């Protein structure tokens, strides 16, 4: 296919090169003006006809200043004044450049199209004792599907029949297989690696993890970065201005010759210089390379399990100087373990709290349930007080379980030494009287400390932790991670207040949370980052960036990709505008020819596109 694409330019190049050689060698028969014209027309037609046809079609739509029209006028103009080789060269190298640009852009887009490869087109649905193959769109939530080793999971679902191992690389960028427990969610796009597994479908195909990723990447191109918007406006102004300069290049010297006796006006000379302006009046280098750079940045990030919801967020993250983390589940594993119980009857307290929290999927509830011995106790009249805890009736008594603030809210006195305990606690009261406390410990994620260091090395000046846990525990974690500040005992409203305070200091802040409980904070931040929340509707809706793994170090990777993308965009803008202005000045002074103009247009555009594709290479 590529050979056919280059066939016409190859024919044109061969005729152009042989014509230049024969002219330089003084070939007798080639000296005839008619022969030269016919020869160069033959070289022009293979590459020029298509461009001139496009120019006509665009003009019919009202787009007179299209790049096709500009190149057509420049080439025809060069023929008119007898500059045949330049006339062919303008069109030839424009066509070659456009073809190479298209190839570069297509290969860049392949990085995004490869995401489509992990959307399976079939699902094996279990119906009784048989298995029926259906299109994923035909499978309903609640159906049971079967996935064999090496196959991709076609739909999101809950794992049945024991733990299983899955390769999550397509979603998270991590190549190490991950073991998922029975009853946990398996996302579409994962690959079963150990044995045949069965899942109960939890979402239709349109709402699956794969569909969400693809939708986010596709929609990202609609959210333009400031640089893209600038280039759009610049392109609309640049081309008419340069064309006007081309007209003035011909007209002003002629007008000057009318009032200046000593000035000799030569139409051919000034028309040739005007053609230089026409050739470089197309802003292709910017119009193509700048959006491609942002598209490439989004694609490179998606390969690492980082989803930007638009080029504007890729740009916004480069300005971040303060990163604020939620603690639980973001910097810590969120896998609590009961370390001790302070109560007159340890087992009774654990059984009661387990009964009250039985319907909750919170990590603390799971930790308490894991050590409770009597699962038969029942709780009624359960009420959730967001940010504080729960109230319920157990065995005729009114129980309150939750934070120390929950006990304060209920008017229950508690031992003041609990304030300085560096563990997460579940304080308990029965009928208005303090009954005891359950102490739980959480562990830091493996890369939590290195994540803070990476942020500092990527130019982040301040790192903070916000948490609903008590201050003593937050201080302990803040000290271990060497962050600038840790704020505890915060309700969601308190977190919003702290973010607002940081922003009023003139800082650009990114908040990193789970995307569910922290939706207001994510929305308020300059950049909201939801981590490990691919399956969460709220994360997709609220966050600007979604990190599909549970690694806080990916925040620094997102900032690095954003800054590299911005650097490449700036390089292209400065390079393209600088070269074009230089060649225009040289052309006006008679120090540049159409060959230089071709480089200033096609060559610069091609170099800018190739530079833009570095985003894919440098961020792997």
Image: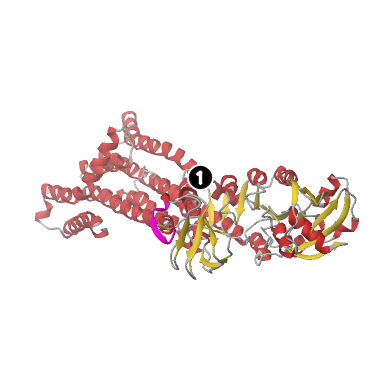
- Residue 510 is left or right of residue 19, and the answer is right
Q: Is residue 356 visible?
A: yes
- Image label count: 1
Q: x%, y% of residue 534? A: 56, 54
The residue indicated by pointer 1 is 227
Considering depth in this image, is 264 or 436 the residue closer to the camera? 436
Q: Is residue 569 magenta?
A: no
Location of the N terminus by quadrant is bottom left
**Furthest residue to the left?**
29
Q: Which stretch did the figure color magenta?
A: 127-136
Q: To which quarter of the image does residue 280 belong? A: top left
Tell which residue pokes out farthest to the bottom in this image: 194
Point out residue 439 in the picture as x, y percentages from the top left corner.
80, 62
By secondary structure, the bulk of the magenta-drawn segment is best described as strand
Q: Is residue 402 left or right of residue 432?
A: left
**Is residue 266 shown to the viewer in this render?**
no
Against 216, is 158 above or below? below
Label 1: which secondary element? helix
Query: Residue 338 vs residue 581: left or right?
Result: right
Looking at this view, is 288 or 354 the one in front? Answer: 354
- Expressed as whole percent of the image width and height from the top left, the position of residue 554 reads 59, 60
Give the percent coordinates (x, y) of residue 287: 41, 45
Q: How is the image coloured?
A: secondary structure
Q: In the depicted view, which residue is nearer to us: 417 or 449?
A: 417
Residue density around tag 1, few if under 14, some if 14–19, many if 20 or more, within 10 Å: some
Instruction: Judge left or right: residue 115 versus residue 39.
Output: right
Viewer-proximal residue, 220 or 542? 542
């Amino acid at each position: 296919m590529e050979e056919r694409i280059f066939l016409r330019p190859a024919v044109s190049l061969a005729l152009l090169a042989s014509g230049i050689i024969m002219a330089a060698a003084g070939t007798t028969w080639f000296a005839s003006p008619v022969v030269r014209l016919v020869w160069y027309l033959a070289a022009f037609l293979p590459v020029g006809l298509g461009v001139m046809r496009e120019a006509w079609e665009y003009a019919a739509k009202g787009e007179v200043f299209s790049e096709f029209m500009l190149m057509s006028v420049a080439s025809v103009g060069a023929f008119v004044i007898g500059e045949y080789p330049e006339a062919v060269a303008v069109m030839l190298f424009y066509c070659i450049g456009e073809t190479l640009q298209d190839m570069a852009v297509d290969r860049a887009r392949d990085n995004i199209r490869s995401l489509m490869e992990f959307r399976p087109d079939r699902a094996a649905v279990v119906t009784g004792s048989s298995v029926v193959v259906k299109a994923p769109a035909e499978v309903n939530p609640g159906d049971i599907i079967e996935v064999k080793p090496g196959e991709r999971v076609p739909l999101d679902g809950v794992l049945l029949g024991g733990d299983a191992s899955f390769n999550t690389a397509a979603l998270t960028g991590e190549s190490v297989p991950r073991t998922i427990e029975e009853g946990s969610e398996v996302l579409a796009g994962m690959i079963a690696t150990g044995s045949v597994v069965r899942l109960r479908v939890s979402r239709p195909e349109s709402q699956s993890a794969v569909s969400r990723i693809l939708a986010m990447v596709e929609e990202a191109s609609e959210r333009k970065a400031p640089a893209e918007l600038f280039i759009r406006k610049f392109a609309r102004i640049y081309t008419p201005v340069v064309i006007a300069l081309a007209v003035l290049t011909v007209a002003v010297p002629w007008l000057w010759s009318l009032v200046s006796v000593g000035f000799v006006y030569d139409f051919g000379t000034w028309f040739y210089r005007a053609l230089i302006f026409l050739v470089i009046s197309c802003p292709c280098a910017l119009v193509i390379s700048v959006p491609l750079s942002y598209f490439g940045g989004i694609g490179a990030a998606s390969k690492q399990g980082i989803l930007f919801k638009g080029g504007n967020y890729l740009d916004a993250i480069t300005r971040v100087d303060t990163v604020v983390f939620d603690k639980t589940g973001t910097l810590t594993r969120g896998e609590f373990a009961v370390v001790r119980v302070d109560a007159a009857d340890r087992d009774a307290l654990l059984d009661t709290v387990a009964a009250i929290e039985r319907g909750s999927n919170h990590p603390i509830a799971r930790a308490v349930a894991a050590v409770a011995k009597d699962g038969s106790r029942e709780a009624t009249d359960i009420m959730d007080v967001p940010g504080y805890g729960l109230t319920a009736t157990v065995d005729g008594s009114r129980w309150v379980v939750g934070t120390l603030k929950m006990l304060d809210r209920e008017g229950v006195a508690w031992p003041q030494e609990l304030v300085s305990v560096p563990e997460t606690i579940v304080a308990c009261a029965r009928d208005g009287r303090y009954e005891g406390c359950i102490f739980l410990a959480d562990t830091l994620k493996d890369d939590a400390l290195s994540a803070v260091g990476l942020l500092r090395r990527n130019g982040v000046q301040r790192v903070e932790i916000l948490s609903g846990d008590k201050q003593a525990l937050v201080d302990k974690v803040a000290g271990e991670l060497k962050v600038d500040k840790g704020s505890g005992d915060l309700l969601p409203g308190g977190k919003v207040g702290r973010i607002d305070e940081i922003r009023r200091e003139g800082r650009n802040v990114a908040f990193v949370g789970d995307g569910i409980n922290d939706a207001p904070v994510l929305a308020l931040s300059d950049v909201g980052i939801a981590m490990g929340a691919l399956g969460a509707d709220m994360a997709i809706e609220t966050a600007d960036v979604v990190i599909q793994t549970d690694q806080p170090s990916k925040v620094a990777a997102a900032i690095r990709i954003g800054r590299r993308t911005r650097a490449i965009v700036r390089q292209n803008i400065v390079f393209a505008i600088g070269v074009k202005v230089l060649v225009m000045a040289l052309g006006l002074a008679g120090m540049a020819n159409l060959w230089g103009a071709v480089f200033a247009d096609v060559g610069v555009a091609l170099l800018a596109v190739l530079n833009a594709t570095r985003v894919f290479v440098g961020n792997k």
